[in-house]
Image (spheres, rainbow, N blue to C red):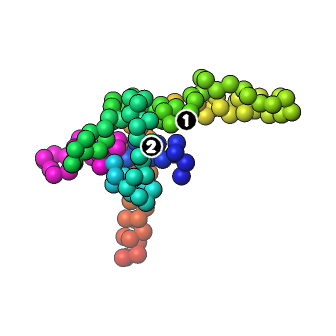
Amino acid sequence: MNETTLAMCATLEIAAHERALLRETEPSTVRRVAPTQDIAMKLTGFSRGLQTTMPKLAAHGIVVGVKGRRGGHRLAKPESEITLLDIFEAVEKTNFEEVTESFSADIPSIVQWVIGIARRVQRRSLASWTLASALDEIEAREAIISQQFTREVLMDSS
């Protein structure tokens, strides 16, 4: 998994953790911040798997690190205000606005033109998805899968 994908997945995990906390009706012992080491283990297989990624997200105002024994990360602003483009630009060395066409003269202009279009389409697509809309989509898909599974179990038992 490349760092940009990892950053998007980690930020979605943090947003999902916060959403779950908001849905709780009783106080619990669940950590109030997302446990970054646990998320890193889940996504990369080792606890320090997000060590270089999280500071980039924090520097761009996407997450806030919380120190201490029960520390981790939380979103720096509401999930509806963070787009996948924000995360992309936090991790990538340059953002879409700063990308310049640095093609050599031997690359045909049509290739340059097509790559330029692809960048603009990717930018619009990433900007259209917030963490909130992505989590809503994940939950909707999980509900559909759950309904299908329930239907199959009911059909098998009859």
**Mark 2 near mark 1, Cβ–Cβ under 8 Å?**
no
Asked whether residue 29 is drawn in magenta, I would say yes
Near-viewer residue (7 or 82): 7
Can residue 126 be seen at all in this image of the molecule?
no
Task: Give the image location of residue 118, x and y in percent.
Answer: 68, 34
Q: Residue at 73% of width from left, 28% of height from top? A: 102
Mark 1 crowdedness (10 Å alpha carbons): few <14, some 14-19, many ≥20:
few
Near-viewer residue (53 or 62): 53
Q: Secondary structure at mark 2?
A: loop
Q: Quadrant of the C terminus?
A: bottom left
Asked whether residue 4 is drawn in magenta, I would say no
- Report which residue position mark 1 lands on: 92
Which of the two discs, 2 and 1, labels the residue nearer the N terminus? Answer: 2
Q: Amino acid under label 1?
A: Glu
Residues under labels 2 and 1: Cα distance? Answer: 12 Å
Q: Residue at 50% of width from left, 36% of height from top? A: 91
- Report which residue position mark 2 lands on: 52
31 horizontally vs 5: left or right:
left
Q: Residue at 38% of width from left, 34% of height from top? A: 58
Q: Which residues are magenta?
A: 14-35
2 up-or-down from 157: above or below: above
